[in-house]
C-alpha cells in the first residue's frame, strides 16, 4: 500500500511518542507526527516551524528514523550558534591554506553526512552567501569546499527548522525566497503549548516527577483550580518555560500540595502575556531575557512575602512595630541575596521570646534539610536564606 494511504493507529502513535520522548495527546501534535512519518519515506525537504521551546527538534529525528537513510549518519547543526565567518567551513569544508587558520583540510557536514540526514536548526540565521551555497547543494547535490575548485557530490536529506517569520525575513531581504521554497517542500508547524491545553497537565506532571525524584523530594500535585490556571496561562516560553516552572516549584515549595494561589506566584504578570507568533528578523538582535527576568521577579516576590509574614508574626506576638527596610524595597534583583541577609540579621528579637523564635527557626531549617536530603543549597532556597546564613545557622543550632 502506498505510504500516503497508510493510517496510523493510536498504538503506532504511542510507540513513536515513547521512542522519541514526546508527551501529549493533542490532535495537532498527532497530525504533525503522522506527517513526519509519511514524508520520511520520500526525499522531500522539510521545514519545521514553530515558536521557541515547542520541541521542533523531535521531528527531524522521526523523519530520519523512518526513512531509508536510518542506517546513515544523522547530524544536527545549530546555524545560529556558528559564527558567520566559519559557517561555510562547517557545512561545506575547506582545503588546507584556504584561510589563516586552515592548517589541514576539513570535511564539512554535507560531506560526512553523505547518505544520511542533516538537520539545520535555526536555518533563518544563515548569511546570504551561505544561503546561495545551500541552494546549490539542495538543487544539484554539488558543492565546493572553501579554497577548492573541485566539485564534490553528496546525497544528503535536509530537514530545516526555524522560529522566524520567514515571510517577513524574505520581505526584509534577509532570506532568499527561492531557498525558502526549496526548503519548504513540506512544512510541519509545531503547535505552541497554549494550543495544546489538554497536554499541559501531562507535561507538568512528568517534569514534576522527574525533578522530585532527582532532588529526593515528596511528590508534587496540583488541585483542580491550579490545574485550570496552568492550562489557561499563555506560556510564552512554551514547554521550556513549563519545565522551568515545575523545577522551581519542586525546589522552593515545602508544601507540595500546590493550589492556585501558590502557583500564581510563579506565573508571569498578566500584562506580559501579549500575543506572539513567530520571531521576526528585527527581534534577533540581542538575547531575550524576559523568561529569566520573570524567574528573578518571582523570587523577589517570594522573599518579600516571607519578610511580610515574619513582620506580621513579630507584631502579633511581641507587639513590635517593624517596617520593611527601604533598602530592601528598592533593592535591584542582583542584590536580592545581600538585602535579604541584611534584613534577617537586622531583626533583633525581644529577649523573653528569643528562645521560642530560635526553636521555630531551628525546626524550620531541620525540616528543610530533611526534605532536601541534606542538600544545603536546596534547603537554603526552601527557608529563604542565603547559603552563607544557612551554614551559620546550622553551626549555631548544632544541626
Image (spheres, grey):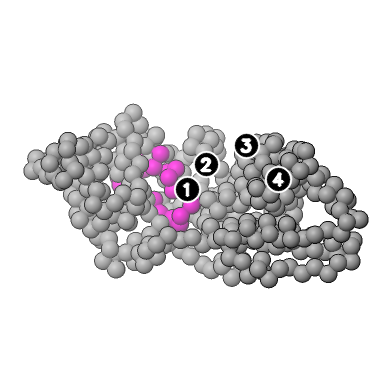
Q: Residue at x 47, y 48 (%)?
A: 55
- In the rendered image, the vertical position of residue 321 relative to residue 75, given as above or below: below
In the rendered image, the quadrant that contains the N terminus is: top left
- Mark 1–mark 4 Cα distance, whole angstroms, equals 44 Å
Q: Secondary structure at mark 2?
A: loop
Which mark identifies residue 392? 4
Say if mark 1 contacts mark 2, CB within 8 Å.
yes
Q: Are marks 3 and 2 in contact (CB under 8 Å)?
A: no
Q: Secondary structure at mark 4?
A: helix
User: In terms of sequence position, does the residue under pointer 3 or pointer 2 come before the other?
Assistant: 2
Give, as a single range, the part of the protein colored magenta.
38-61
For mark 1, give the secondary structure.
loop
Nearest to viewer (mark 3 / mark 2): 3
Q: Earlier in the sequence, mark 3 or mark 1?
A: 1
Q: Quadrant of residue 108?
A: top left
Q: Label 1, label 2: how many angstroms apart (C-alpha)?
A: 9 Å
Residue labelled with disc 2:
22
Residue 353 percent location from the top left of the image? 89, 55
The residue identified by callout 3 is 214
Question: In the image, what residue occupies the spot 80% across and 59% down?
Answer: 348
Amino acid at each position: 500500500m502506498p505510504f500516503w494511504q497508510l493510517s496510523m493507529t493510536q498504538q503506532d502513535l504511542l510507540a513513536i511518542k515513547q521512542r522519541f520522548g514526546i508527551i501529549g495527546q493533542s490532535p495537532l501534535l498527532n497530525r504533525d507526527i503522522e506527517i513526519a512519518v509519511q514524508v520520511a519515506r520520500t526525499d522531500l525537504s522539510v521545514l519545521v516551524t514553530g515558536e521557541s521551546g515547542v520541541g521542533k527538534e523531535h521531528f527531524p529525528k522521526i523523519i530520519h528514523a523512518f526513512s531509508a537513510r536510518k542506517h546513515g549518519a544523522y547530524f544536527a547543526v545549530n546555524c545560529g550558534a556558528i559564527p558567520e565567518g566559519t559557517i561555510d567551513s562547517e557545512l561545506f569544508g575547506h582545503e588546507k591554506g584556504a584561510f589563516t587558520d586552515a592548517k589541514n583540510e576539513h570535511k564539512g557536514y554535507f560531506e560526512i553526512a553523505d547518505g544520511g540526514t542533516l538537520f539545520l536548526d535555526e536555518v533563518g540565521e544563515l548569511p546570504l552567501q551561505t544561503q546561495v551555497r545551500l541552494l546549490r547543494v539542495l538543487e544539484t547535490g554539488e558543492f565546493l569546499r572553501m579554497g577548492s575548485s573541485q566539485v564534490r557530490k553528496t546525497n544528503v536529506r535536509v530537514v530545516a527548522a526555524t522560529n522566524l517569520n520567514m515571510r517577513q525575513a524574505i520581505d526584509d531581504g534577509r532570506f532568499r525566497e527561492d531557498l525558502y521554497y526549496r526548503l519548504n517542500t513540506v512544512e510541519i508547524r509545531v503547535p505552541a503549548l497554549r494550543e495544546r491545553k489538554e497536554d499541559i497537565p501531562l507535561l507538568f506532571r512528568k517534569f514534576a516527577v522527574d525533578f522530585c525524584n532527582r532532588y529526593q523530594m515528596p511528590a508534587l500535585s496540583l488541585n483542580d483550580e491550579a490545574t485550570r490556571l496552568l492550562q489557561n496561562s499563555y506560556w510564552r516560553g512554551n514547554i521550556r518555560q513549563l519545565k522551568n516552572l515545575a523545577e522551581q516549584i519542586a525546589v522552593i515549595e515545602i508544601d507540595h500540595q500546590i493550589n492556585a494561589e501558590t502557583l500564581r506566584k510563579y506565573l508571569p504578570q498578566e500584562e506580559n502575556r501579549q500575543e506572539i507568533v513567530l520571531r521576526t528578523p528585527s527581534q534577533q538582535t540581542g538575547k531575550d531575557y524576559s523568561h529569566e527576568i520573570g524567574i528573578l521577579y518571582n523570587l523577589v516576590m517570594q522573599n518579600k512575602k516571607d519578610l511580610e509574614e515574619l513582620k506580621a508574626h513579630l507584631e502579633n506576638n511581641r507587639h513590635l512595630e517593624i517596617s520593611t527596610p527601604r533598602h530592601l524595597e528598592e533593592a535591584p534583583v542582583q542584590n536580592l541575596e545581600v538585602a535579604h541577609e541584611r534584613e534577617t540579621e537586622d531583626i533583633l528579637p525581644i529577649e523573653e521570646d528569643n528562645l521560642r523564635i530560635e526553636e521555630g527557626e531551628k525546626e524550620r531549617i531541620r525540616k528543610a534539610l530533611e526534605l532536601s536530603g541534606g542538600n544545603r543549597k536546596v534547603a537554603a532556597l526552601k527557608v529563604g536564606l542565603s547559603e552563607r546564613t544557612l551554614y551559620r545557622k546550622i553551626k549555631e543550632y548544632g544541626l
